[in-house]
Image: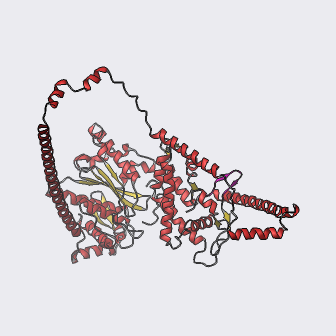
Amino acid sequence: SAGVAFRLSGSKRPFRGLLESTGTSSAIVAAAPTTGTSKNAVTLPAAAASSDNRIPIDAHTLESIRLEVLSVIPESLYSVALAIIGSDTVRLMHEVGYYEEENSNGRGSGDGSSSSGSGSSILASLSRISIADGRSEETDAEKAERRVQELISALQTLVQGVGSVHRTIESWEEAQAALSEVLILPGEIEDIRRAEEARKLQEEAKEEEDEARQQEEFAAPSRRGGRGTIAAFIARSAKLRSSGKVQVIKRNLSVKKYAGLIQLAQLDSQRKFKQLTCTSIPPPVAASAADDEASLPSPGVVAQSSILSPSQRMDRLIDQRFQEAEAAARAKERDEAERQDAEIAAREEREEAEAAAAEAANRASSLLRPLTEEEQEIVRDAIYGIGPPDEVLATSDTDSVQRQSLHKLQPGVWLNDEVIHYFLLMLARRDAKLCEEHPSRKPCHFFKSFFITKILDDGRGYRYANVKRWSKKVPGKDIFNLDRIFFPVNVGGMHWTVAVAFMQEKRIQFFDSMCGSGIEYLEALFRYIKDEHKAKKGSPLPDEDEWELVECRPDTPQQENGFDCGVFTCMFCDFLSTDCPLNFSQEHITQCRERIALSVMKGVAIE
């Protein structure tokens, strides 16, 4: 709903690395204006592109990573990297970064301008270089997805690195140091530019030195009285080059030295691998004389086998083969019988599940049945009727609903807690009626949103003492004898969701029409169940490891605007309390608003 603040962490992307120290110089990025891009766009030299595999990220991606790291530390580097990889927010920020780069570079504007000193132009230029190998026809979506995969690949390097499991990250600064091994952080761009300028100056000085040396070499034959003038020497050199007899030798690095460096790296890698994988093998135990004697066949056996004739040995071998064949045939028959039994059981189970799903679908469709003319008249008077705003239209015990609250059921209006709490009370009445009709049915209970507010102590932290006596209000005064418990949640005073504890299935699940995680509420409720068992039963929860906390699933019905979250929350409770599948969507919400109004006015949730 409107104003919902998305979580940037806890949810439980191209840019090649550029810096490579080589003595006093580094392979870095050179600033060069290009057509259709920012005048400050940075183009990656070929040498730098192939020398480092670090991935650059923008400030938004770095901030989302920081929040993810702070939510898990202290933890091992292995776990921190996995948490970043699994964060939807990090992926989204890195993916969105692509479109921001394209827009900031004037894509589609035609003027090729951008803000001076923008880091986005640098990232965009390097992004174009990374796809220059035949992938220039990629769509925007493909480019954005590739950015995400490059970021994941870089982080997986940390996960797979030697010692990542034992390297503990205790602060954001330590995390930054580890991340800088595979990522280029936003603050490094200016350092890269200065290093490139220094490298250019070095190269220019070297070129001037080489040119002077060449001129001196060209002039040497004439001074020594050799084979002609400088012009003749140049002509002979050009002739040799055209004939293919001149071989240009690059002297940047000795081949032997390069091969030696590779061997050293391979030896170091093998040494680390052996330290991780090799285990000491105990020395062989010397066999004693008694063991040697025991390993020899007894004289009687040798004598008996030696007196068998060839035909007897053949008969014995044939008998052995027959026995093996019979055993194999029996095993095959047994396996085939087990396979057929498994298929029959699976088919029967599938048919039962399909029948149950069909029955549940029928029940769900009945919940969205068309209203009669009489019911429509009641709804119109409740939602659009004229009268004093504070006029009470429905009451039950200490709860009531005023006309101005029912007017909030008009399309496009937020629901308030008065309507939601009263509708949950109507669901509780319907549930009690169903339990009377079916004595074997376990009851449900519907807490008000104040329960979550109290147990989290208004955001200050978990406090069981605030809700210790609330279980006395549930049917039977024992939450462990209930079927389901509904906990409506008002997130930040602007968004309605609900957490449901399936007590017999040992599962707590979060339902949110904006697909939020809700893990903090799930953990608090599971802690409440454990504390409640210890306080009321006098012992710890016996099957604690069998409970499952389920965050909001992608197939949960989702709202398509910023004001229907309260209606979705009411429908989650309505459908789940009768064990119906959530087969409603945004297109049914106006009908759902009318259903809530009719339930309030009739004093019980309609079936």
In the image, the segment drawn in magenta is 17-28
For the point 24% across and 64% down, the residue is 605
The C terminus lies in quadrant: bottom left
Rendering colour mode? secondary structure
| Front one among 282 and 419 | 282
For the point 16% across and 31% down, the residue is 305
Q: Is residue 389 left or right of residue 114?
A: left
* Picture quadrant of residue 365: bottom left
* Picture quadrant of residue 490: bottom left
For the point 20% across and 52% down, the residue is 442
Q: Is residue 561 left or right of residue 190?
A: left
| Front one among 595 and 237 | 237
Residue 145 visible in the shown view: yes
For the point 77% across and 69% down, the residue is 236
Residue 307 sits above or below residue 272 on the image: above
Percent across and percent down for residue 238 are: 74, 70
Percent across and percent down for residue 551 are: 36, 55
Q: Is residue 21 magenta?
A: yes
Residue 128 sits above or below residue 61 on the image: below
